[in-house]
């Protein structure tokens, strides 16, 4: 089973306004609401890939109901903890440029937090647990590390897709995969990274710090995979970019969905790129047909 944990789900409210004038009344061209939050996105794409997955996290209020209903309608298996506060709404404003305004997240009470930790009692050594996204501010500073300790105690694999201190604190527990994008990598090490040659030493550093596999995703410029056997560059297929929200989550779903089937990081990387690009070329997250149609256009080169 691949569990995904989303501590801070969201409704992603996508708003198209063209042109957009700050400080004036603007009319939307169109808008759409999708269930969001990194782990939820990973579970949605894993379900497309027919991998067994259960999405876990906190959901509350009318916004939480919207997400729950959507997941049930789409047959996404989930086991969320019901909280008394409302799940956040994240605004994705699409105009000449994309602007994101993400909420900080609801209040999680200590008993709700404990309930989530007890969900991890079901994890066993055949499972993979994907821990993704930001943490609502009311959770303890070491909540990610506490979850990772429980997962390791069960001898399961884990993936961590978060930033800053939470990522650094969990690397020594040897995550199966970490996937910062180039900007997150720059922030993590307080450096400016533009070229692939500049990125490489910092990808290697994440391996040295404990990760078993590292992907540095670079949006339209593809991605780099670092393993203990080599470094690989992945090139995106060609397509018409519609919405890149969730491309990184889709990439993680592709990599882990494939890796858990055959333990081959290169074919998993290829599937990761297919899923990331398929989402970038779709209005919502990637569908299976789009993913499969892109798969054999993807080139991987050892560097
Ligand atoms: N504009 C794009 N064109 C083609 N593929 C893309 C595009 N944006 C993202 N992807 C694919 O999705 C992957 C993850 O996207 P990225 O934007 O780097 O992650 P994140 O959403 O975490 O910031 C990229 O490495 C790439 O393979
Ligand atoms: O938990 P965070 O870091 O605030 O991010 C939440 C946002 O990230 C997303 O999961 C998209 O993430 P990616 O574009 O990195 O794949 C959105 O659905 C959501 O609004």
Image (cartoon, rainbow, N blue to C red):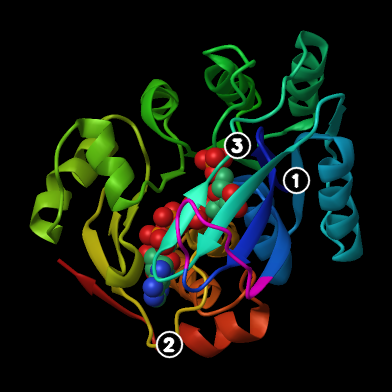
Frontmost of labels 2 and 3 is 3
- Check the image and report above or below for 135 versus 242: above
Q: Nearer the viewer, mark 3 or mark 1?
A: 3
Residue labelled 2 has its Cβ within 8 Å of some atom of ligand 1: yes
Looking at the rendered structure, which numbered label has been put on residue 55? 1
Which of the two discs, 3 and 1, labels the residue nearer the N terminus?
1
Disc 3 crowd, CA 10 A, few/some/many (<14, 14-19, 20+)? some
> Which element is circle 3 on?
loop
Q: Earlier along the polypeptide chain: callout 2 or callout 3?
A: 3
Q: Give above or below for 28 relative to 242.
A: above
In the image, which disc is placed on residue 103? 3
Residue at 45% across / 79% down in the picture?
241
- Distance between the alpha carbons at the discs numbered 3 and 1: 21 Å
Which of the 4 image quarters holds residue 8? top right
Cβ of mark 3 under 8 Å from ligand 2: the answer is yes
| Residue at 45% in and 54% down | 22
**Secondary structure under the numbered disc 2 in the rendered image:** loop
Q: Is residue 198 left or right of residue 58?
A: left
Q: Nearer the viewer, residue 232 or 78?
A: 78
Question: Which residue does the image show at 62% across and 62% down from the upper left?
Answer: 14
Q: Which residues are magenta?
A: 20-30
């Amino acid at each position: 089973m691949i569990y995904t944990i989303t501590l801070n789900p969201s409704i992603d409210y996508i708003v198209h306004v063209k042109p957009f004038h700050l400080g004036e009344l603007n009319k939307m061209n169109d808008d759409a609401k999708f269930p969001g939050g990194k782990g939820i996105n990973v579970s949605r794409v894993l379900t497309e890939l027919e991998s067994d997955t259960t999405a876990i996290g906190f959901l509350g209020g009318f916004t939480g109901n919207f997400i729950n209903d959507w997941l049930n309608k789409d047959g996404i298996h989930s086991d969320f903890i019901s909280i008394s506060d409302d799940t956040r709404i994240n605004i994705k404003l699409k105009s000449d440029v994309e602007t994101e305004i993400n909420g900080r997240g609801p209040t999680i009470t200590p008993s709700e937090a404990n309930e989530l930790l007890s969900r991890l009692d079901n994890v066993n050594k055949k499972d993979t647990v994907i821990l993704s996204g930001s943490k609502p501010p009311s959770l303890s500073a070491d909540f990610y590390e506490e979850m990772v300790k429980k997962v390791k105690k069960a001898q399961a694999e884990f993936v961590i897709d978060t930033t800053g201190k939470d990522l650094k604190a969990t690397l020594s527990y040897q995550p199966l995969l970490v996937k910062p994008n180039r900007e997150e990598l720059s922030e993590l090490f307080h450096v400016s990274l533009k070229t692939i040659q500049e990125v490489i030493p910092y990808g290697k550093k994440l391996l040295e710090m404990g990760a078993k596999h590292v992907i540095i995703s670079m949006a339209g410029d593809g991605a780099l995979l670092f393993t203990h056997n080599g470094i690989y560059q992945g090139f995106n297929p060609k397509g018409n970019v519609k919405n890149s929200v969730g491309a990184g989550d889709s990439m993680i779903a592709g990599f882990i969905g494939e890796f858990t089937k055959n333990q081959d990081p290169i074919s998993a990387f290829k599937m990761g790129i297919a899923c990331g690009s398929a989402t970038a070329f779709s209005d919502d997250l990637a569908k299976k047909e789009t993913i499969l149609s892109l798969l054999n256009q993807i080139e991987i080169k050892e560097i």
